[in-house]
Amino acid sequence: MSKLCTGAIVPVKTFSKAKTRLNLSNEKTEDLCKMMLNEVLQTISKSSVIEKIAVVSKDESALKIGKKFGAVEIYDEKEKGVNEAASIADKYFLDEGFASTILLPQDIPLIQTEDIQNLCDFQMSGRCVLVVPSRKFDGTNALLRSPVDVMETHYDEDSYKIHLTTANNKSAKAALVLIRRIMLDVDEPADLQIILKYSKPSISKTLENLLI
């Protein structure tokens, strides 16, 4: 594998246990998660800068969706969280000789291929970490790491700050990158209204049905 290749990591929590703050029924929650994962993976699969996608999940439905887009299916039996899932995927991409990875969540359905390209355009030579925060600046919605093992992930409260600080401590060039569509994630009911306002018709229709 070329040392210039970039891999995408998409950790997926079991659908039935995800997005509890949305206060949706289990069925609607699963439908929403499936829709968002489909949108995110479809976009990543069309990106010219991503060589391989790894979906890390315990949910068989999520892995099946990943397979549809040619993703490597990594079964996360213990499902201890994003950091553990990222660690599992890191090992895969290191073994495959990838130069860098971008970790993207499954709940940013507005992401477009140009957003991934724009993020990669900010990549600096040598050891580099790029962080796209969440809209509320309380999390990390995209994390580019080069090399793959430049640092472990730290997905906790204010994770974007922790990622930047950790990168500096690891002598890596670090930058906060603001990419609007990547910053728009879905965690609370108000987020659904924002996504509904700016999404394409296919997403809007699904969301409207979920909100009935």
Image (cartoon, rainbow, N blue to C red):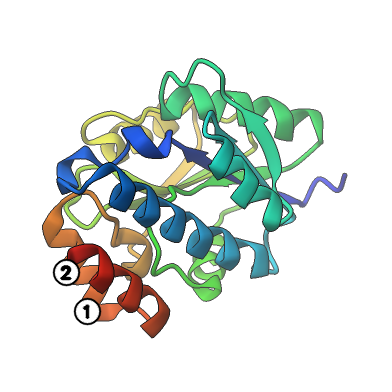
Tell me the number on the disc at residue 197. Answer: 1
**Left or right: 86 with respect to 64?**
left
Q: Tell me which corner region of the image, top left, top right, bottom left or bottom right, holds residue 203.
A: bottom left
Q: In x, y percent, where is residue 157? A: 21, 31
Most extreme residue toward the left is: 190
Q: Nearer the viewer, residue 157 or 33?
A: 33
Dot 1: element: helix
Work out which quarter of the rendered image holds the C terminus and state it.
Answer: bottom left
Q: Tell me the kind of residue under disc 1.
A: Lys
Q: Tell me the kind of residue under disc 2.
A: Gln
Most extreme residue toward the right is: 1
Q: Nearer the viewer, residue 140 or 65?
A: 65
**Left or right: 158 with respect to 57?**
left
Q: Nearer the viewer, residue 87 or 26?
A: 26
Q: In x, y percent, where is residue 172? A: 50, 36
Q: In x, y percent, where is residue 51? A: 74, 55
Where is mark 2, residue-wise? Answer: 193
Which residue lies at the image location 35% right of the left edge and 56% below the top edge? Answer: 32
Res. 122 in view: no
Q: Tell me which corner region of the image, top left, top right, bottom left or bottom right, holds residue 87.
A: top right
Which residue lies at the image location 50% right of the left edge and 15% below the top edge? Answer: 78
Mark 1: give few (<14), some (14-19) or many (20+) Cα within 10 Å. Answer: few
Residues at badges 2 and 1 in contact (C-beta under 8 Å)? yes
Dot 2: element: helix
**Left or right: 116 with respect to 181?**
right
Most extreme residue toward the bottom is: 201
